[in-house]
Image: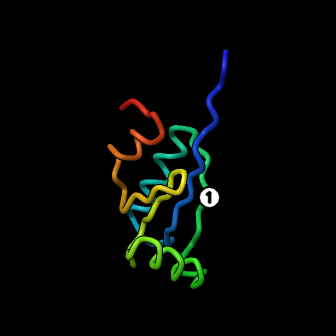
């Protein structure tokens, strides 16, 4: 039986963002490993993600380098093969 490797998930967030916290909770519930980058503390990351996506708001979630703007659950489920 072959186990599939989980896609690489990086989330750009801030501690006070409710959608960010919802996304983090969702990933934990589904046992999805992710790297969380706090753009309120990392200005370089904030500039980098704005350059890549044109977005200044959070969350911005990269799944295998494909950006998802906001907590777009249907798109997250599709890219991570989560049913539900």
**Rendering coords of residue 83 (x, y %):** 39, 30
Q: Residues within 10 Å of mark 1 (few under 14, many from 20)?
A: few
Q: Nearer the viewer, residue 33 or 67?
A: 67
Residue placed under numbered mark 1 in the picture = 35
Residue at image location 66% in from the left, 20% down from the top: 2
Residue at image location 49% in from the left, 68% down from the top: 13
Residue at image location 44% in from the left, 62% down from the top: 20
**Rendering coords of residue 11 (x, y %):** 52, 61
Q: Nearer the viewer, residue 23 or 44?
A: 44
Residue at image location 59% in from the left, 83% down from the top: 44
Q: Quadrant of residue 41?
A: bottom right
Q: Taking 75 as reference, is 30 left or right?
A: right
Q: Quadrant of residue 82?
A: top left
Q: Quadrant of residue 59?
A: bottom left
**Rendering coords of residue 18 (x, y %):** 39, 64
What coloring was used for the rendering?
A: rainbow
Q: Taking 67 as reference, is 33 left or right?
A: right
Determine whether the residue tagged by mark 1 lies in a helix, strand or loop.
Answer: strand
């Amino acid at each position: 039986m072959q186990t599939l490797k989980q896609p690489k998930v990086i989330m750009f967030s801030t501690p006070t963002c409710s959608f960010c916290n919802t996304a983090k909770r969702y990933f934990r519930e589904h046992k999805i490993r992710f790297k969380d980058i706090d753009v309120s503390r990392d200005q370089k990351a904030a500039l980098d993600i704005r350059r890549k996506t044109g977005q200044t708001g959070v969350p911005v979630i990269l799944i295998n380098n494909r950006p998802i703007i906001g907590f777009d659950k249907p798109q997250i489920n599709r890219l991570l093969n989560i049913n539900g």
